[in-house]
Image (spheres, rainbow, N blue to C red):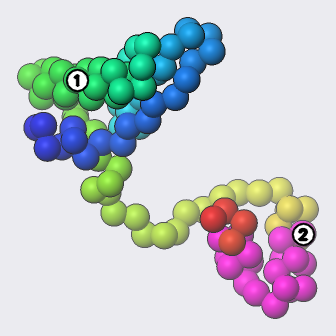
Amino acid sequence: MAREVDRYTYRVTWSDEDSEYVGLCAELPSLSWLEQSPEKALMGIRKLAKETVADLRRSKEAVPEPISMRSYSGKFMVRVPPEVHRMLALKAAESGVSINRLVSSKLS
């Protein structure tokens, strides 16, 4: 259990609204932890994530898989208006690349 939680994706950012640092966990987006220092915010959100996963297990609910452990195909579909599709096709043709390569370069 602790090992899984150690592989979760954590982030600490400043909250102007709260005038404190907020710790967040991408796999458990409903959780947050406020503290006066970024180090304490990270420790707090990690502890809260561990407790939350333990609660989920006790109640036999699904425990989120760490993003770092998930497999990705490298493919996803995005719907765009026909005008945008046409513009991308034109830019790709002018650049001598496929639409996929053009969009991939824009996203990275």
Magenta residues span 87-104
90 or 24, which lies in front? 24
Q: Name the residue under label 1.
A: 47
Bin the neighbour count of mark 2 within 10 Å (Cα to Cα): few under 14, some 14-19, many 20 and up. few
Quadrant containing the C terminus in the rendered view: bottom right
Q: Which label is found at residue 87?
A: 2
Q: Is mark 2 on a helix, strand or loop?
A: helix
Residue 99 on image: x %, y %: 74, 77
Vertical arrangement, residue 68 with respect to residue 16, above or below: below
Amino acid type indicated by mark 1: Lys
Amino acid type indicated by mark 2: Met
Quadrant containing the N terminus in the rendered view: top left
82 or 65, which lies in front? 65
Separation of residues labelled 1 and 2 (CA atoms):
48 Å
In the rendered image, residue 85 lying in the magenta stretch gets the answer no
Quadrant in which residue 59 is drawn: top left
25 or 54, which lies in front? 25
Vertical arrangement, residue 15 with respect to residue 60, above or below: above
